[in-house]
Amino acid sequence: MFKKKTLITVIAICLVVAGLAFGAIKIAKADDANNQQSLVQRLAQKLNLNESKVSTAMDQIRTEDQEARLAKMKEKLEQAVKDGVITEEQKQKILDKQTEMQQNREKMQTWEEENDIDMSKLRDYGIDLGMGGGRGHGGPMGEQIKI
């Protein structure tokens, strides 16, 4: 009887902690896009630079970081092939899916800009088209890579 009550208590605590963590992640994602723009503006002001130049530089840095992450992913996938965890064909499927997801993120960003829509502001209303939050956040929520 005592073990059953203890187990129920532990499960309840875990659920509460998980709920709090999920809430914190959701808030962080919603604020991320606003913080990025604010950072660009603040840096431009502090350094007395053109805001578009700062934004361009940050975009270039982001692209370089994405390329570095992809290179590291390729290395890890190659090791997984060598270790017999996946096949060469499965590795390629993963890389193809990664490329597809990146293209979808870029298309979504272009669509938002063309339509003058800031989806990050709509997330506060529970509206999310499932494209993640950029900067390394995956594609549609729950989407899995099938190999």
Image (cartoon, rainbow, N blue to C red):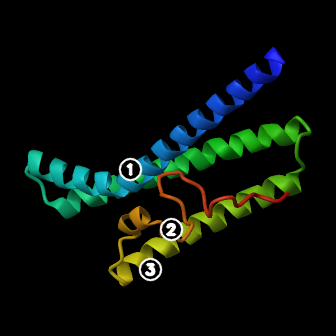
Q: Please, what is the three-letter code of the amino acid marked with disc 1?
A: Ile
Q: Residue furthest left?
A: 48
User: Which residue, given by chain and number where applicable, does mark 3 sit on?
Assistant: 111
Residue ID at (63%, 41%): 72
Residue ID at (92%, 39%): 84
Q: Please, what is the three-letter code of the amino acid marked with disc 3?
A: Trp
Q: x, y (%) of residue 143?
A: 70, 61
Q: x, y (%) of residue 144?
A: 74, 58
Residue 13 figure quarter: top right
User: Which residue, given by chain and number where applicable, does mark 2 sit on?
Assistant: 128
Who comes first in sequence, dot 1 or dot 2? Answer: 1
Give how far apart the Cα atoms at labels 3 and 1 are: 22 Å
Left or right of 138? Residue 45 is left
Query: Up-down: is 27 above or below 50?
Result: above
Q: x, y (%) of residue 66?
A: 51, 51
- Residue 61 marker: 1
| Number of the front mark, 1 or 2 | 2
Q: Please, what is the three-letter code of the amino acid marked with disc 2?
A: Asp
Who comes first in sequence, dot 3 or dot 2? Answer: 3
Count of residue discs: 3
Give how far apart the Cα atoms at labels 1 and 2 are: 26 Å
Answer few, some or many: residues within 10 Å of disc 1's Cα (few below 14, many 20 plus, some between 14 and 19).
few
| Number of the front mark, 3 or 2 | 2
